[in-house]
Image (spheres, rainbow, N blue to C red):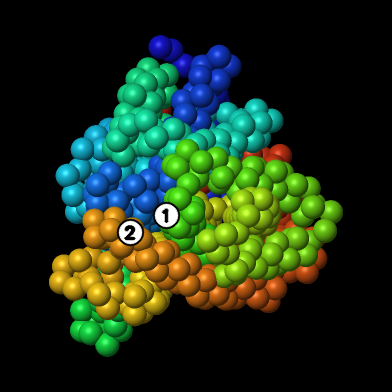
Amino acid sequence: MKFTYGPVVRVPVDRFPKVFMAASPTLPKSRQQLILVILMSCSVLIWLENTVLSTALETLADPVRGLGADPGQLQWATGAYTLAFATLMFTAGTSGDRFGHRTVFSGGLVIFAGSSVWAAYSSDAGQLIAARAAMGVGSALMTPAMMAILMWTFSGPARTTAIGIFSTSAGVGMAAGPVLAGFLLDRFWWGSVFLVNVPVAVLTLIGLLVLVPNFRSPVPRPLDPAGMLLSMSGLVALAYGLIRAGQVAAWSRTDVWAPIVAGLVLLAVFVLVELRVRAPGFDPRLFAQRAFGGGNVALGLLLFGVAAISFYNAFYLQGALGFSPMKAGLANIPTACGALVAAPLASRLVRRLSIRLVTVPALTVAALTMGAYGFLGLHTPLVQIEVLLLVQGLSIGMVIGPVTAALIGSLPLEQAGAGAAVTNTVRQTGSVIGIAVGGTIMSIVYRRAVEPSLEGVTGPARDQALVSAEQARHVATTMHQPALAQAADSAFIHAMNVGAGWIAAVALLGAAVLLITLPASKGMKRPAPGPDQEPDHQEPAALPERVHTGSANSRSQGACRCDPA
């Protein structure tokens, strides 16, 4: 397949010392459209994987229909994916610059498909956790490559249109995930929610290899193995300590506080190491910018709350209320629909008002909807739950899109790639910690609440009932004690109510951070150019159609490197 290459545009080094720009191949319009379809199908696949597991949690906790996983194991099954995603994403972007984005994308797809099969046929919770971590590795390799390929494939107004169309894949995945998972769980075994990924991944891989050129940066950024290892080991140790606290219902044990301390120390060392690297994959220096640092902290706190309350919601609908997986999936649609409606609405409001005036009230409302879980019970009408989920989706959608766009837009062009890596990592890290902390609060409070009801239960049955409400219901069925099942439901509701209050407090803290750090005026301006740069308003005239941001220390020039398909 032949390509038509555009002219190479030489940009004087003394004008843009840190920005590498080059022309990339011009592809036929039909091929561009097919590439967009491939990228969207993969994006939907990743978003499906982010949502289907929440519908399957109750089934996985069931000793008969699932794996009999306890809350700690389910926290790891959920968090392992996000943990791998968070710590590998900035390294994956660098790898794509060096080895080619199609190469890295293809490797991610193969890992994702293979680990999906592994997860589907896992015989215990430990295998599922390992498979989920491998799936996170695959997703981390694919995500930066998708956006890079999109930016190389399209230019001008077509790029704007393509990004808009591509962004709808998140909403499609969020809305379809719970429904698809519910449909599969009602008709097949739990592994089907993972096995369904395989045919989509195979078709996407074929299209990728046939249609997508192997775009890569002519000035590859250095890899950051030290940063990757430190960040991953720190987050794993921290998450382990937090989850372990819920399993043993005590904070004073060495196997609880020691991993937490070790994790915090490793993350501190990670920051120090990244500060000493000339071109870090994760640049902590960006947090020194008030709006960028504060906005990322607020997003991390919001995603903390979203992950934790979603973890609660899965057990509330299917466990306490007894919804089927399909009914629970349908019940969650208002959240996705609210986010889809709110995202474009928020963009228009931000242009008319200020970002602070739009996002601070929205994040406050999102926090209050999380706190409203403190008032849900076993007899709450479904319509009230649906209204709550709709408002929650609307308010979250009003925050994430505008704040993310404003944060990246506030940075100089040469820091946009590093800023995107920081923002994505912070969001995923907030989700990991949210699942760990939220699940631990639920486990500790549940155990204390259900213990008085277990006076007549002894031995292994008692230990099993203390693990979770799902395990207690199984014990109640085996021993023909319906009162125990009722006590377990009441204990779970109490634990959810208590946990919701703490989650809402964390999310409200995020709203306070936005209020303090975001500007009150419309928009967020890029920093003023340095002495060796001309003003921003003169740059577009000199820019080629395709722009690639290289590493911070790039000083060379050249053309796009692209291996023909």
Which of the pair 171/278 is nearer the observer? 171
Spot the residue most to the top.
Answer: 1
Task: Indicate the quadrant where residue 250 lies.
Answer: bottom left
Which of the pair 460/411 is nearer the observer? 460
Residue under the image location 64 percent in, 39 percent down: 543
Rendered location of residue 10, percent (x, y): 55, 37
Secondary structure, mark 2, is: helix
Task: Indicate the quadrant where residue 504 lies.
Answer: bottom right
Callout 1: few (<14), some (14-19), or many (20+) C-alpha neighbours within 10 Å?
Answer: many
Question: Is residue 346 positioned above or below 468 on the image?
Answer: above
Q: Amino acid at mark 1?
A: Gly
Q: Disc 2 versus disc 1: distance between alpha carbons?
A: 9 Å
Secondary structure, mark 1, is: helix
Residue under the image location 52 percent in, 71 percent down: 497
Q: Could you tell me if the residues under marks 2 and 1 are in contact, i.e. CB atoms within 8 Å? A: yes
Residue under the image location 75 percent in, 60 percent down: 358
Rendered location of residue 283, percent (x, y): 44, 64
Q: Would residue 465 appear left or right of 542 to someone viewing this image? A: left
From the image, tell me which residue sits under label 2: 473
Q: Quadrant of the C terminus?
A: top left
Q: Nearer the viewer, mark 2 or mark 1?
A: 2
Question: Is residue 221 positioned above or below 375 on the image?
Answer: above
Spot the residue most to the bottom.
Answer: 252
Callout 2: few (<14), some (14-19), or many (20+) C-alpha neighbours within 10 Å?
Answer: many
Which of the pair 514/338 is nearer the observer? 338
Question: Is residue 275 positioned above or below 481 on the image?
Answer: below
From the image, tell me which residue sits under label 1: 319
Q: Please tell me which of labels 2 and 1 falls first in the chain.
A: 1
Residue 384 visible at all:
yes
